[in-house]
Amino acid sequence: MKSIMTTAAIRKKLITYIAEADDKKVKGMYLLFEEEIEKEKEFVLTDEQMKILEEEREKHLNGKSKSYTAQEAHDVIRGKRKL
């Protein structure tokens, strides 16, 4: 009787297989999934996410929210600065 594998187990087996497969097989698999892979790169916000983004933008432009430079954000993330 064949056991049912979890999705996580299948992913692990596929990752191992792809890592060890010859170039021809890897290219073939890529061609098979290329369209789906390229679709994954598209980043689309939902209407609700766009609404939230616009609300936050308006708060920023009106001075009603605290904003940080890229360097300040980096420092906070790295623990070099507190909010």
Image (cartoon, rainbow, N blue to C red):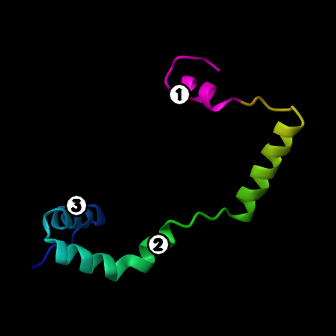
Which mark is drawn over residue 17? Answer: none
Image check: 26 left or right of 58?
left
Q: Are marks 3 and 2 in contact (CB under 8 Å)?
A: no
Measured Cα–Cα span from mark 3 to mark 2? 22 Å
Label 1 close to label 3 by CB (< 8 Å): no
Q: What element carries label 1?
A: helix
Q: Residue furthest right?
A: 62
Residue type marked 2: Glu
Furthest toward the left, the residue is: 1
Label 2 secondary element: helix
Amino acid on which the number 3 mark rests in the picture: Lys
Image vertical order of residue 20 relative to residue 32, above or below: above
Disc on the earlier residue, 2 or 1:
2
Residue 23 spot, x, y in % from top left:
18, 72
Q: Looking at the image, which residue is at 44% across and 76% down?
A: 36
Residue 16 location, quadrant: bottom left
Quarter the C terminus occupies: top right
Label 2 environment density (alpha carbons within 10 Å; few <14, some 14–19, many ≥20): few
Q: Cβ–Cβ below 8 Å for labels 2 and 1?
A: no
Determine the residue positioned at 22% across, 67% down.
14
Dot 3 lies on which element? helix
* Side of 62 where 22 appears, left or right: left
Q: How far apart are marks 1 and 3 (CA)?
A: 31 Å
Residue assigned mark 1: 77
Residue shown at 9% from the left, 79% from the top: 1
Q: Residue 12 carries which label?
A: 3
**Residue type beneath disc 1:** Ile
The residue range painted magenta reads 68-83
Disc 2 marks which residue?
A: 38
Between circles 1 and 3, the one closer to the viewer is 1
Q: Who comes first in sequence, dot 1 or dot 3?
A: 3
